Image (cartoon, rainbow, N blue to C red):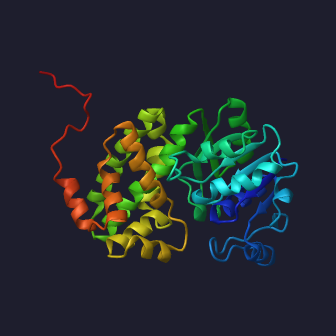
Amino acid sequence: MAKIGIIGAGSWGIALALLLNKNGHQVTVWSIVAAEIEMLNTEREHKDKLPGVKLPDDICFTTKLEEATSESDLLVLAVPSPYIRSTSTMLKPFIKQNQIIVNVAKGIEEVTFMTLSQIVEEEIPQADVAVLSGPSHAEEVGRGIPTTIVVGAKTKKTAEFIQNTFMSEVFRVYISPDVLGIELGAALKNVVALAAGIADGLGYGDNTKAALITRGIAEIARLGTAMGGKYETFAGLSGIGDLIVTCASKHSRNRKAGMLIGQGMTMDQAMEEVKMVVEGVYSTKAAIGLAEKYGIDLPIIEQVNEVLFHGKPADVAVKDLMIRDKKLEHLDVPWNE
């Protein structure tokens, strides 16, 4: 049995707390929001973000970081991506040397273009930082629906420890050394999911969504490999796997926000309606900055950026994607002539 602290009591943090509790671990969940902790202690259920999922009495809930981190074998960082840096700053005094921290949020910092694990490492240099990602909506994990994810870590020893901690009959865990590729796939797929949602909001069909998913993973892999990620990662769980579920699922906040934009809402109106952090909005600007830095063409992501931040009508953005210059699908596949 391991002692585990979950930093963040949103839907994903709660779902993972329940999973780890069922695996026999001692789990303490922290939130900075006192009313949230009071609700969880009283109701044993997150009424707002994971309704219907009952939480056993032996999961502890607290507003005290020291209580969640003290003597923990593993910390799970489950706050939304915009709060990773500030939360890491608060955590630093409580983290011992080589403390394992598994980041489960998805995003890229808008100003610095840093991945979330890079932010944690900068703020908590003594930590051993890993990531967990893949097609894994909290609404399904919380109900024990079979899910498969990938853990990225710098050493195989750390990866295997996390794998053994999380693995269960309903939660299959693979491991990988490609931390960067896993995080880039996880963050950039949210931008493509916004595009898929916009297409749904415009009333387009399955053909459109399949095209966005296929060409979207091509963009993600093109940028990701230029930055040092491995192509195989983008063909895996945190790449095409996470992209498919986020573009298609009713649980996807990025798809929902995109759909509302496609129906005529502004970005701000859509985010307010979703009532949860739409991480693709934050990652879009970062993706554009990275594309400029590495000289990579990202036509879908560029059009999402135009719609979100420059008032471009969504239907015009789709038209501009369709009438771009003619291309080969794969530049490195030669003609036999």
Please state the horizontal and vertical placement of residue 230, each as a whole percent of the image. Answer: 47, 32
Question: Could you tell whether 281 is left or right of 165 in the image?
Answer: left
Q: Is residue 212 above or below residue 230?
A: below
The answer to whether residue 167 shows anywhere in this view is no
State which quadrant residue 51 falls in: bottom right
Q: How many marks?
A: 0
Left or right, residue 82 beside residue 267: right
Residue sitting farthest toward the front:
111
7 over 57 or under it: above or below: above
Viewer can see residue 123: yes
Residue found 80% across the figure and 46% down from its top = 95
Tell me: residue 269, above or below residue 332. below
How far from the left and from the top, in percent, is residue 164?
73, 41
Task: Identify which residue is drawn at 27% across, 66% down.
Answer: 312
Q: Residue at x 27, y 58 (%)?
A: 208
Please tell me in which quadrant of the rendered image residue 285 appears: bottom left
Rendered location of residue 97, percent (x, y): 81, 38
User: In the image, residue 260 lies at what x, y percent?
Assistant: 38, 73
Quadrant for residue 11, please give it. Answer: bottom right
Residue at the top extreme, as displayed: 337
Q: Say which residue appears at 85% left-offset and 57% top-offset.
A: 66
Of 328 and 99, the residue lying toward us: 99
Horizontal arrangement in the rendering, residue 264 relative to residue 85 (left or right): left
Quarter of the picture holding the C terminus: top left
Q: Nearer the viewer, residue 143 or 240?
A: 240
